[in-house]
Image (cartoon, rainbow, N blue to C red):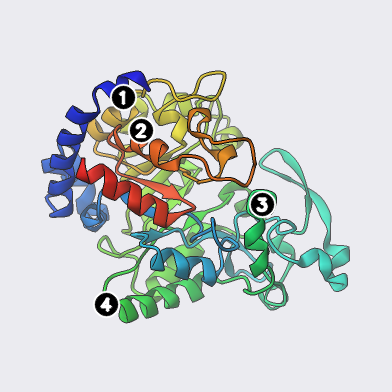
Amino acid sequence: MGAQESNGQERGTARRTLLSAAVLGAGGAALGLPGTASADERHGGGYRSLPRPTVIGHRGASGYRPEHTFGSYQLALDLGADVVEAGDLVPTRDGHLVCRHEPEIGGTTDVAAHPEFAGRKTTKTLDGVPTTGWFTEDFTLAELKTLRAVERIPANRPHNTLYDGRWEIPTFEEVLRWQDEQTRKRGKQVWIYPETKHPTYFRALGLGLEERVAKLLRKYGKDRKDSPVILQSFEPSSIQRLDKLVGNPLVVLLSAANTRPWDFVAAGDPRTVADLVTPAGLEWIASYAQGIGPTLDLVIPKDAAGNLTTATTLVADAHRAGLILHPYTMRNENPFLPANFRKGTAVDAYGDPFGAFKAYFETGIDGVFSDNADTAVLARADFLMR
């Protein structure tokens, strides 16, 4: 933190200059991002007109409502999110796309309380990990619509359990219609940021995600380079497949440096995330995508005690490759914050997220996923006023 604090004023001034150019729609050239023009010719530059740093409502406003519900999505917009992550896309047995964090729904719905589905509980291997529960691919859409969403992490968010059972599981098609409705009601374009979840796993089951996503985007006229839909995935091959199917801006999500995307594991590709965040790896990503969504630890690592250390060169390296960066995930509660921004020990208590936002914004990231859009919006205002 010391180096970031000592250089904060200089960095803040420089960052505001870049932000002003971005908000005015100056595009990649003003931001000094070589290669941006050719990439945007294929996948549009509309996303570059979003406010910077962009506030992305992570699974909606999941700090306040059960995630991936219309209650959560709606609140994210009300709290000022520029983009809503609606949603994490997984298929039903009959081929519909629904919005759940994972295909296993025991932790995010009331399925365990439905005796008619008790026999559906099973153990599957999901991306190499034995997982026990109920899976969307074993249910028809009609069956899933009888369930209701519940809070995924009630120990950290006990107040969110007030809303357990209030909302059903949304389909991606319903989200696309909701986006149009909200755009009309609010008088400004609403953006969404869906993710293909476990695409290799589902392709092996005959439930390929990318073609289904592309078909729905085409149906609603949202498959073009200027469409307000950013697509993301942890599997680079899913983004490469989408690159051939739609014109939307595309983002590769990146987990911990020592991990491998599951499609790499399945294909025998030895590369790790550490290889992908090198200049050469970022150039490879830029050949088919417009951005990366790294875990925050790839932007500023933590020490053994969980405190922030010194920022890596990832932001500068990605920008040189013409990529935007939308790291994940900022949350207000103590367990999710760097140790030096926690207050007390209560797992459901808020720490100092404003301090953490400041540290991450100073690195030059283009946006951030946050469970608490209102906190992120205020933190951005503080940052831009410096």
Q: Which residue is mark 2?
A: 359
Depth check, mark 4 against mark 1: the one in front is 1
Q: Quadrant of the N terminus?
A: top left
**Three-letter amino acid code at disc 3?**
Ile
**Three-letter amino acid code at disc 1?**
Gln
Q: Quote the CA–CA distance across marks 1 and 3.
A: 32 Å
Residue closest to the eye, 126 or 255: 255
Q: Secondary structure at mark 2?
A: helix
Q: Which of disc 4 and disc 2 is earlier in sequence?
A: 4
Rendered location of residue 242, percent (x, y): 41, 54
Q: Quadrant for residue 230, please give it.
A: bottom left
Q: Residue at x 88, y 64 (%)?
A: 119
**Three-letter amino acid code at disc 4?**
Gly
Depth check, mark 2 against mark 4: the one in front is 2
Residue closest to the eye, 287 or 294: 294
Q: Are marks 1 and 2 in contact (CB under 8 Å)?
A: yes
Q: Secondary structure at mark 3?
A: loop
Q: Quote the CA–CA distance across marks 4 and 3.
A: 34 Å
Q: Which of disc 3 and disc 1 is earlier in sequence?
A: 1
Name the side, left or right, on which 20 lies relative to 361. Answer: left
Q: Which residue is mark 1?
A: 4
Q: Quote the CA–CA distance across marks 3 and 2.
A: 26 Å
- Farthest front residue in view: 344
Q: Residue at x 42, y 56 (%)?
A: 373
Q: Which residue is mark 3?
A: 153
Q: Is residue 345 above or below residue 80?
A: above
